[in-house]
Amino acid sequence: MACLTISCQWPVAAKCCWGCLLCCCAGSVGRCGQQWRGEVLLGLLIVLLRRQRWPLWAAVAALTLLLVDVALIAPALLTQAFNPLSLNLATIVLCIIALRGRTAR
């Protein structure tokens, strides 16, 4: 994949590949490419192991840790539109709803 120099909302320009532009915009250029792989893997686990509860608990734990990480590393992101706080809390609530639905059966 071709790489390019982009400037995001962050005041820095990052050299990044097409597959991980979001990663660079989030300021994690050093870990470029690893973030989306983990998200895809966790999504596949949730879909493929839908009768299991542990993938949802793993998602809740990961989202909580990522939210704490953003709050410590880049707290300015918490006030922007579509910020990690609102998105992570909404996803955690959806995971909890799914977990409750699985215990009711």
Image (spheres, rainbow, N blue to C red):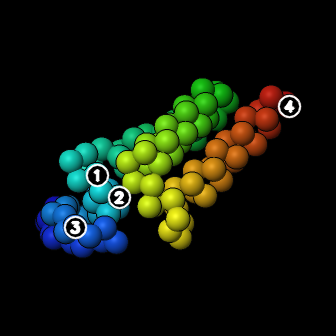
Image coordinates of residue 23 in percent, x first then y, are 32, 56
Q: Amino acid at mark 3?
A: Val
Q: Amino acid at mark 2?
A: Ala
Image coordinates of residue 65 in percent, x first then y, are 49, 37
| CB-based contact (under 8 Å), mark 3 and mark 1 | no
Q: What whole-number distance in Å separates the C-alpha atoms at marks 4 and 1?
A: 40 Å
Viewer-side label of 4, 3: 3
Q: Which mark is residue 76?
A: none
Viewer-side label of 4, 1: 1
Q: Secondary structure at mark 2?
A: loop
Q: Residue at x 39, y 54 (%)?
A: 74
* Residue positioned most to the right: 104
Q: Is residue 11 left or right of residue 95?
A: left
Q: Secondary structure at mark 4?
A: loop
Q: What whole-number distance in Å separates the C-alpha atoms at marks 1 and 2?
A: 6 Å
| CB-based contact (under 8 Å), mark 4 and mark 3 | no
Q: Secondary structure at mark 1?
A: loop
| CB-based contact (under 8 Å), mark 1 and mark 2 | yes
Viewer-side label of 3, 1: 3
| Quarter of the rendering containing residue 99 | top right
| Image quarter (top left, top right, bottom left or bottom right) of the N terminus | bottom left
Mark 3 or mark 2, which has the lower sequence index?
Answer: 3
Q: What whole-number distance in Å separates the C-alpha atoms at marks 4 and 3?
A: 49 Å
Q: Residues within 10 Å of mark 2 (few under 14, many from 20)?
A: some
Mark 2 or mark 4, which has the lower sequence index?
Answer: 2
Q: Which mark is residue 28?
A: 1
| Residue 52 showing in the rendered view | yes
Q: Residues within 10 Å of mark 3 (few under 14, many from 20)?
A: few
Residue topped by disc 4: 104
Residue topped by disc 3: 12
Residue topped by disc 2: 26
